[in-house]
Image (tube, rainbow, N blue to C red):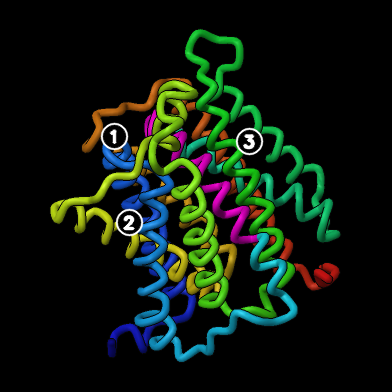
Amino acid sequence: MVALAHMSRNTLGAIAAVTSSLCFSVNDATVKFMSGDFSLPQMMFLRSIIAIAVILFVLAPFERQKLSLHGSRQGVLIVRGLLMVLANLFFFLGIAVLPIADTVGIFFICPLMILAMSVVFLGETAGPRRWSAVGIGLIGVLIMLRPGGEGFQIAFLLPLIAAACYAILQVMTRAIGDAVTATTMSLYLQLTFFVVMGAMGIAFGAGQYDGLGGELFAFLLRPWVWPVMSDLPLFLIIGIATAGSNYFVSQAYRLGEASLVAPLEYVALPMGVMFGVVIFGDWPSVNSWVGMILIVGAGLFVVWRESLAAQSPDRHPPRPQ
């Protein structure tokens, strides 16, 4: 504790960013590991209960922040929650049938999507170099997707759709970031998961639609089963990892400069490769490596350009309304 107190804000932000990436990677690997035994909605429902408990009894008291479920931004927070639900559904459906590295690699087109959406919806500016980075990132995605090729799978589109949902969510976050605390945002997200996943459990948790859609949707429509005691540690892992990832990524951007924190989020990619190789024996293909290098390289270039622009005294971007 004493050592942490003497660290700079950027150092603490960097530690939080890497911790967040570790939490995300642990969550991804654990969900994939459990995907053969449990329905995805059931896992997300139980995960949300644990995450809510962590937020209410650990994070909120630690931060000494007042949680509020009412306010002028309530509608936006609910929409953010629904977008996060969709992003998680598509992402984890992809992880269940694809190597972790491929799913995470495609998902990392998200920062470039955020750039494009920020220009369109928030009135931010982007020069030809940043748009070129977006184009290079898209080429990387196409190399990984291999449309029309023998290795193409419809499942490759799932992390791409998840990235689009997450990008819209983060653009909304930029617009309300000064008005709502990170802990309140996290609580709204988990409450949305609890309600939506509970409704899905009521609708088809009995497994009456199991088998429809083949392997791709088996993870979604599988009947809910009562976990045994040996499953409890795994559910605790994904619940704590989810709450931790949301908390630490918020802390990272609150404490550190964005130009320092953003590149560290890409640590999740080598972590994903490591978990995929060690736990599941999934080695990325040559196409996957090339695509991931292009996507990550383009994303890091955008971060670098953002850092230079932030240091320019002539830059006066419009404030989000």
Task: Tell me, yes or no, whether the highlighted magenta stretch contains residue 161.
Answer: no
| Secondary structure state at the residue bearing disc 2 | helix
Identity of the residue drawn at 40% across and 66% down = 243
Side (left or right) of 5 relative to 290: left
The N terminus - image quarter: bottom left
| Secondary structure state at the residue bearing disc 3 | helix
Q: Nearer the viewer, mark 1 or mark 3?
A: 1
Q: Is residue 313 above or below residue 58?
A: above
Identified by mark 2, the residue type is Ile
Side (left or right) of 21 relative to 187: left
Residue to which mark 2 is pinned:
238
Task: Tell me, yes or no, whether the highlighted magenta stretch contains residue 82.
Answer: yes
The span shown in magenta is: 80-102
Q: Can residue 314 be seen?
A: no
| Secondary structure state at the residue bearing disc 1 | loop
Q: Nearer the viewer, mark 1 or mark 2?
A: 1
Side (left or right) of 215 relative to 26: right
Circles 1 and 2 in contact, beta carbons < 8 Å: no
Residue to which mark 1 is pinned:
36
Q: Residues within 10 Å of mark 3 (few under 14, many from 20)?
A: many
Q: Nearer the viewer, mark 3 or mark 2?
A: 2
Q: Is residue 173 above or below residue 38?
A: below
Mark 1 or mark 3, earlier in chain: 1
Residue 92 lies, in percent from the top left, at: 44, 41
Q: Can residue 197 be seen?
A: yes
Residue nearer the viewer, 276 or 8: 276
Residue to which mark 3 is pinned:
137
